[in-house]
Amino acid sequence: MSHADAAAMRPRRFMPNGPLKGRIRVPGDKSISHRSIMLGALAVGETRVTGLLEGEDVLATAAAMRAMGASVERVGDSASGGEWVVNGVGVGALLQPREPLDMGNSGTSTRLLMGLIASHPITATFIGDASLSKRPMGRVITPLSQMGASFEASEGGRLPLILKGTSPAVPITYRLPVASAQVKSAVLLAGLNTPGKTTVIEPVPTRDHSERMLRGFGTQLDVEVEPDGTRIITVTGEAELRPQVIDVPGDPSSAAFFIVAALLVPGSEVLIENVGLNPTRAGLVSVLRQMGGDITEVNPREVGGEPVADLLVRHSVLKGIEVDPQVAPSMIDEFPVLFVAASLAEGTTTTSGLDELRVKESDRLAVMATALKAAGARIEEREDGLVIEGTGGEALAGTDAAIATHLDHRIAMSMAVAGLVSRSGVEVDDTRPIATSFPVFESMLAGLVA
Ligand SMILES: O=C(O)C1=C[C@@H](OP(=O)(O)O)[C@@H](O)[C@H](O)C1
Ligand SMILES: C=C(OP(=O)(O)O)C(=O)O
């Protein structure tokens, strides 16, 4: 970070503040919001979206789709909830963007849009912030190159990079070498404008929002599940998408911070409304229940083709467990806050199989180990996970010096939760990145402790 950036950082100390009480509705799911705009932009006609996450990452996707010819506008006032209208150009008709596409902090925008553009005859330059510019893009460059796109990337397959798409692209069958919904989605989206069948083989299931939404938009998408659970997902191009009306459910990854905070702070009872509980995303809730967390699903229903419920969360004494690495993909963004929960549990929590956490907005294993140790937790960092010796419910000491969040929203929010269960509070060096996924996090927290 440059000196000028450092001057603009927004530090804050999160203090213990008594029980959390009340009801909240977290903003829309980030993954589903990105996809609503992208697919809306490929459907000729008007797609209407309510509940869209108005976070910086999703706004980066919206700006990119505008730069490629779609109209993406917010209509209505905030009082009526705010609705977004996307007027799409049609599959195959994306325009050449005139400026570099600024992806900000968003890996999802970058990798999914690389897929979309790869099978269009256009050239785009991708740029991003310091965090995104460190993240590996080789994982999408490899399959998209096989489909005929070409790339000029910075060292190590990173941003900034130039992507030259091709049409017609070549359909491929691609076996995912890492469990990644972003890589899966990039290939499937490239398949939309590719003649024939593009197939992704997914040995470990990851979030399936792309598959659900592609079907919702009228694409032919077939999923075969092998006896060992491997999923074979095939999209048939050249697809024609029909515009949709979409209601985006609340983001379970945002709800996660309040679920853990309510479990940890004695006397808390919080109802979190409208939380998406797609099984490919609900790992945290099941792990916290295994640890003894009192989480009740109220009024289960379906919203926007996704399972949803209200979650009633009450303070609980948590017990350390060995977390099954198989659940990792279904809670991949929730590990930072799970580490906070484990730091207050009785006994030891062991996590493994989490190599992917090292290539998120920050190295989330190293950064959380350092941050929680600074706050007084007992942590051992291993190659692929953390081992955490919990306090058995006793508050953490808290920090003097500010925790370095490395432009990572999930680190900032997780350490804010740690501050609520500390004696002297936890100082976070920069709260600005919270706006990438959860702009109202701090006001929502204030409302629950008021
Ligand atoms: O497809 C998506 O919307 C996402 C997939 C995950 O990334 P990976 O595919 O890199 O695991 C997740 O961490 C990210 O926040 C959103
Ligand atoms: C990893 C994340 O997002 P992205 O990959 O889109 O930057 C996240 O939101 O935790």
Image (tube, rainbow, N blue to C red):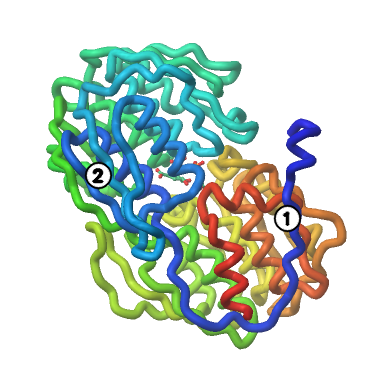
The residue lying furthest to the front in this view is 77
Numbered disc 2: secondary structure = helix
Q: Where is residue 173 in the image (x, y as percent from the top left)?
A: 25, 26
What residue is at 31 percent from the left and 56 percent from the top?
50
For the C terminus, give its image quadrant.
bottom right
What residue is at 21 percent from the left and 42 percent from the top?
214
| 152 with respect to 306 (left or right) | right
Q: In the drawing, what numbered circle is on residue 211?
A: 2
Among the two numbered marks 1 and 2 on one chain, the one whose residue lies closer to the N terminus: 2
- Res 222 seen here: no
Residue type indicated by callout 2: Glu
Q: In which quarter of the image is residue 298?
A: bottom left
Other-residue count near label 1 (Cα within 10 Å), few / some / many at <14 / 14–19 / ≥20:
some
What residue is at 34 percent from the left and 17 percent from the top?
96
Report the front residue among 146 and 153: 153
**Which residue has dot 1 on it?**
380
For the N terminus, give its image quadrant.
top right
